[in-house]
Amino acid sequence: MQYRKDKTGRPLSVLGYGCMRFTRKGAGIDLDKAEREVLAAIDAGVNYFDTAYIYPGNEAALGEILARNHCRDKVYIASKLPQYLVRSPADLDRYFGEQLRRLQTERIDYYLMHMLTDVESWHKMEKAGVREWLAQKQAAGQIGQVGFSFHGNTAMFLRLLDVYDWDFCQIQYNYMDEYSQAGRAGLEAAAHKGLPVIIMEPLRGGKLVNLLPETARRRFAQSGRDWTPAEWALRWLWDQPQVTCVLSGMNSLDMLAENCRIADSARPEDLTPEDKALLAQVKADVEAKVKAPCTGCGYCMPCPKGVDIPGALRCYNEMYTENKRTGRREYWQVVSLRRKAAFATQCVGCGACESHCPQHLPIRALLKEADRALRPPHYRVATWVARRWLFGRER
């Protein structure tokens, strides 16, 4: 196993264990199976284990596995505060205390604000006293390093980097998301500030393996490299020295062994120009199925009415490059649950976006199409309920 250093110089395995995808059995987690996989990962040198408060049964399963095998001190636990549920200072202690009990530990080594999507969400946490609370927990040794996980656009990520003296961050990043969400610009900005970057969704939840167009599969097969689609995606990430740790939801011993093998052999800047050209062709194969040829450049922004134009068009495209559920779920994460509304329905048709678009896209018409596709009636109802529950009580 290879290691890259965190902000303090502590070595983190380049392959991290994403516990969210522990195999489920009935209403709970298949603890015996998860235990075999976790112990095999530790034996292989994996030392970073990622979980979260809202992953059902997840923290408790990881805590039980580590406790009954007496290996807590062999690993670093990363978990996440459900910041979107925090209403008062008392909530901070309540959620954190529950997490310590579930994990059967006295400390969480890497503690993240879960799914920050905008600066406003952080300011809400500040009003609840999060700065002082984090300082107290760190001084007491109950929290090691403080970071945040992010779903949103690049501009917002860059703003979030400056609102607190973060120790690390976690972003969705893969060769298809190179210029969306935090993107390469976010990765490089975080690294420039000295922040370790943890990568989630390196395979887009398996879609860069299971849902590739046939043309892309043929390119990989004929490349002369004996690499699977998963290996191509992982090597693309580890080729970048700014990437500290890549999370993988490994739920089989075979997958674990394969990923550990790749993690042991992949080196920064190993990919050849031919490798990168092939991946660009694969990306083009996927993007050929898009509905709106938006590059995510952001020239259309800011919208005077607050619409997240690149976000809407990207998620609309994902409905067709991957599947409808994926695009809608992504829109739910990056737009629907944002504190400040950014829906396509806020468009008033002023046309400012179209006058700046390098691709000369009919953005106003595309936004209407995208909104109809991304938010069918039942999604609109669910969005209204979720936003009312998350934000309605603050007014």
Image (cartoon, rainbow, N blue to C red):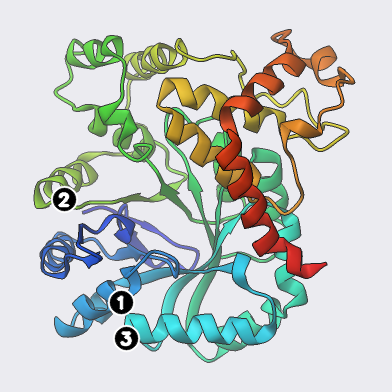
Amino acid beneath label 2:
Leu
Give the quarter of the image for residue 78. bottom left
> Percent from the top left, x then y, of residue 153?
64, 40
> Residue at (42%, 42%) from the top-left corner?
241
Separation (CA) of disc 3 from disc 1: 8 Å
Q: Nearer the viewer, residue 211 or 244?
A: 211
> Residue at (72%, 62%) from the top-left corner?
391
Q: Which residue is mark 2?
A: 256
> Residue at (45%, 12%) from the top-left corner?
289
Figure quadrant of the C terminus? bottom right
Q: Which mark's residue is nearer the viewer, 2 or 1?
A: 1
Amino acid beneath label 1:
Ala
Q: Nearer the viewer, residue 23 or 237?
A: 23
Contact, CB < 8 Å: mark 2 with mark 3?
no
228 up-or-down from 293: above or below: below
Tell me the element at label 3: loop
Mark with earlier residue (2, 1): 1
Tell me the element at label 2: helix
Left or right side of 62 for 365: right
Mark number, residue 60 = 1
Left or right side of 212 for 144: right
Q: Is residue 189 visible?
A: no
Q: Nearer the viewer, residue 112 or 289?
A: 289
Give the quarter of the image for residue 83. bottom right
